[in-house]
Amino acid sequence: MYSLVALGFVLIYKASGVFNFAQGAMVFFAALTFVSLVERGVNFWLALLITLAVMVVLGMAIEKVVLRPLVNQPPITLFMATIGLTFVLEGLSQLAWGSQPHGLDLGIKDVPMEWLAQSTGMFISQFDLFASGIAAVLVASLALFFQYTRIGRALRAVADDHQAAQAVGIPLKNIWAIVWAVAGFVALVAGLMWGARNGVQYALTFIALKALPVLILGGFDSVLGAIVGGLIIGASEKLAEVYIGPMVGGGIESWFAYVIALLFLLVRPQGLFGEKIIDRV
Amino acid sequence: MLYREAGQFKSTYAEDQQIFPIRQDRVAVALLLAVAFVAVPLFANQYWLSAILIPFLIFSLAALGLNILTGYAGQLSLGTAAFMAVGAFMAYNFVLRMPWLGVIPSFILAGLCAAGVGIVFGLPSLRIKGFYLAVATLACQFFVLWAIQRWGWITNNSPSGVIAAQKVEILGYVFDTPQRKYLLTLSIVAVLALLAKNLMRSETGRAFMAVRDMDVAASVIGIPMMKTKLLAFAISSFYCGVAGALYAYTYLGTVEPEAFTLDLSFRILFMIIIGGVGSILGSFLGAGFIILLPIFLSILFGALSHATGMQIPHSVISNLELIIFGGLIIFFLIVEPHGLARQWQIAKEKLRLWPFPH
Amino acid sequence: MNRAQQIGDKILSVEGVSLAFGGVKALQEVSFDVREHEIRAIIGPNGAGKSSMLNVLNGVYHPQQGTIKLRANGAWKEFHDMDSHEAASLGIARTFQNIALFKGMTVLDNVMTGRNLKMRCSFLEQAIWVGRARREELEHRRAVEEVIDFLEIQHIRKTPVGKLPYGLQKRVELARALAAEPTLLLLDEPMSGMNLEEKQDMCRFVLDVNDHYGTTVVLIEHDMGVVMDISDRVVVLDYGRKIGDGTPEEVRANQAVIDAYLGVAH
C-alpha cells in the first residue's frame, strides 16, 4: 500500500528529477473529487472517468504553471515549490468539496477471506489482495511502458540529461506533461485504495509523509526499490509496534519508519536499489 | 539627506569591514532601534503588541535560525518546529526544576538542549544531501513531538501534554504586561540577530557558505566538513530553541505539543523563501510578511462580505489562505528566488543613483 | 632559467599508486616524485588519469594501492590515502578543472576562505566580533589583499564570483589557493578554455608564484607549448600508466610518448 504512493514519487523523480512533495495532496485531491462525484449521484464509472480526466488535466497544469518556469533550477528549489503546491492543492480540494470526511465503498469487502484462513491459517483480506493486485498490475505496466515504448525511452533520456535529450529532438515539454499526467493517474489509483481503507479525509495527505521513508529505503529512482521498501517499512512498523512499542510507551508508528530509513542511510546513502553516484571534480 | 556614499572614503580595512559601511544605513538602523525600543512600547496598543509584534519578533528569530542552516549552510530542514518545541518544553523544565537559575539562563540552556537535538539529527547530513536530508529532518519533527507527548516528565505529567509557562521574572522585575514582554522579546531578538550577523560575516559564515556552494572544494581548502555542518545545525537549532522558549513564555502562555507541528516548520520555511534565503534581513521581512498576510486577508474578506452582504464561511477563508500561501511560495520561487531582501537591495541601489539614474 | 629559489630535494613521492572505479582502472602502478620549488607537469591524452592523479594527491579520491610520501615542515610523512582536510593542513592547495568557486560569495570572501586553516578564534568569539576575532579578521584581510594585488584582481574584490567571466574566475580560484600559503600547489588545467592573452597572463602568474613564493607547482595542461615552456620536468600518463618522465626535451624525444599522442595500434 505504501508502495502505491511511493510509486507516484518515483515516477516523477525518475522522469524529471523533481521530488514531488505534493504527491500526497494529489492523492487526497483525486480521492475527494471521486467521492464527491459519486455522492452527488454520478455513476461510478462515469465518476472514475471524470476524475481521471481531472487528474490528467491537473497534472499537466501543474507542469505548465509551476515547473516549467523553474527549469534548470536546483532540485531543492523545485522541492520547495512542490511544498507550496501541497498547500494550494489542499486548499483547493477542500474549497471545492468541503472538508468533512467521506466514506468510500468500492464494493470489495475488507474482511479476511474465509477459505484462505481455513486452508492455510493466514488472514488476508480480500481488499488487501485486491490492492496488491492493482499495485502489481500498475507497476508491471509502468515498467513495460518505461522499458519498451518510444515515450518510455524518451522519458528515461530526459531524466538523465534534459539538455542532451532536447538536443536529439525529444519534445521536452510534451514528455513532462505526460509524466505529470501519469502521476495524476497513479495518485487517483492510490487515492481510491487508501480512501476505501481509511475513508477520504484530510489525513490522506499525510500518507505521503509515510511514503517518504519507503523512498529513502528503496532509493528515489528505483521502482523495484519502492516496492521492496514498502514491504520492509510496512512489516517492520507493525513488528516494532508489537515488540518495541510497549517498552517505550506505544504510538511509535509516527516515526519508527523514519528511524529505520535514517539508520539505513548512514550505511548506504543511495538506498537499496538507487544508483551510486560518483562525485566528479 | 540623499542616500549617497560619495565622500565616505575608507582608508583602513577595519572601516571597510564594518557591519554597515554606509553612514546613512547606520543612521537608519539606529533610528529603527530607537523606534522599536522607545516609541513602540509607548504608543502601540495591546492588540498590536501581543498579537502582531511579539509573534513577529519570535518568528523572525526562528526564521533566522532556519536561515543560518538552510540559507547559509545550504542544508534544508523541515524540523524547525521540533527544535522550537525542544526549546519551549526544556525552558519550562529548567524554570520548573531549577528555579534558582533565572529565566534568561534557562532560555539559554533550553537553546543548548535544542542545539544538542539539532546535532543528533544533523548527523545524517554528513552522508546525505538535498531532499534526502530534508526527509531525514522530518524524522526529527515526528520523533520530538512523539517524545514530548509520551515522556511524562517533559510536560511534568500533565495529562493533556499542555504546559503553562511560568511567570517571567528577572532580578525581581516581573514581565507581565504586553509592553514588558515585548521589550524582553525585542532585546533577546536584537542581541541574537547582531550575533548572527557577526558570525555570518566572519570565518564561520564563510565556511557555511563554502559548504553550501561547493562542498568538495570546501573540504579541499581545509574546511572541516563534519564540524562545519554540525555547527550549522547546532547554531540554527539554538536560535530555534530560544525562539520556541519565547513562543511559550512571551506569546502563548500555555503550550501544547500540537503547537509545533510540521505546519509550523513549513510556515517558517516559507518565511525565509519569501524574505530571502541567505539573508539576515530577509528573515525579518519574511516573518513580517507571513504574519501580516492573514490579517490583511481577513480585513479584505471582511470588507468584501460587508460590501456584498454575503457571509463568507470561515472554512472558505482558511482554505483560500492555504491557496494564497502556496501560490505565493511558487510565485516567489519563480520570480524572485532571493526574496524580499533582494528587492530591498535593488531599491537601495536605485536610491543610491536617484535622482540622476544615468 | 634564472630563479631566486633553486630546485631542491624531493618533497613529494608517489609510489605504485593504483586507483579503480568499479572495473575502470584509472591509475595503474604510477610512481613519480616532485622536487622542491620545481614546476612539474602531468600530461597525457584525454582519459589518461591526470585529474585522478591530482585527486589522489589531495585526498578527493582514495587509491586502492600505493603510498604517497610528503615532506612537510622538514619531516617525511607517509600516507596510504590522504584525507582532503589533512592534505590542506599539510600545505597542499589546488585549483579545479571545472572552476570550483563558491558562487554566492564575493571574490574577497572566496579568497578569505582560503585562510580558514589559519584562523584560530572560536565561533563564539566571532559572534561577539570585538577583540581578538576582529583583530584576526583584519590581519587575514591584509594577507588576502596582498594575494589580490599579486594576481591583479583588486577591481573585482567585492563582485560575486558568479558574475565574473571565465578567465577571471580561474584567477580568483588561484588566489584562493594561494591565500593558504601552500608549499605544494596543484593546478588542474589552469589555462583550459582561455584565449591566448589570458593564457599568457596565467603563465606569468604561475611562474611568478613559483619564483616569488617558492611554491612547488604540479600542473596538468593540454597546451603543449605552455607545458614545454614553463615546466622543469614532465610526467606522461596514458591509459592510467606512466609512459614517460623527464625534462621537456627528453619527453619530446620519447618514442612511447609520441606513439600515445599520435596513436599506434596497440
Image: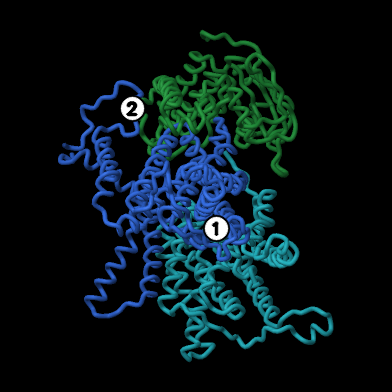
Chain colours: A cyan, B blue, C green
Q: Chain of mark 2?
A: B
Instruction: Give the number of marks.
Output: 2
Asked where in the image residue B333 lies, by quadrant, the reply is: bottom left
Q: What kind of element bears circle 2?
A: helix
**Amino acid type shown at disc 2:** Asp
Relative vertical location of residue A251 with respect to residue A137 in this rendering, above or below: above
Q: Is residue A243 left or right of residue B229?
A: right
Q: What kind of element bears circle 1?
A: helix
Residue at 74 percent of width and 79 percent of height: A124
Identify the disc placed on residue B60.
none
Residue nearer the viewer, C124 or C15: C124
Q: Which residue is mark 2?
A: B16
The image shows residue B233 at horizontal and vertical percentages of: 54, 44
- Dot 1 and dot 2 residues touching (CB under 8 Å): no
Residue nearer the viewer, C77 or C232: C77
Identify the disc placed on residue A159.
1
Residue at 44 percent of width and 29 percent of height: C172
Residue nearer the viewer, B200 or A65: B200
Q: Is residue B272 left or right of residue A102?
A: left
The image shows residue C90 at horizontal and vertical percentages of: 61, 23
Position of the C terminus of chain B, as image quadrant, is: top left
Residue nearer the viewer, A48 or B61: B61
Can see residue B10?
A: yes
**Amino acid type shown at disc 1:** Ala
* Disc number lying in front (1 or 2): 2
The image shows residue B314 at horizontal and vertical percentages of: 37, 74
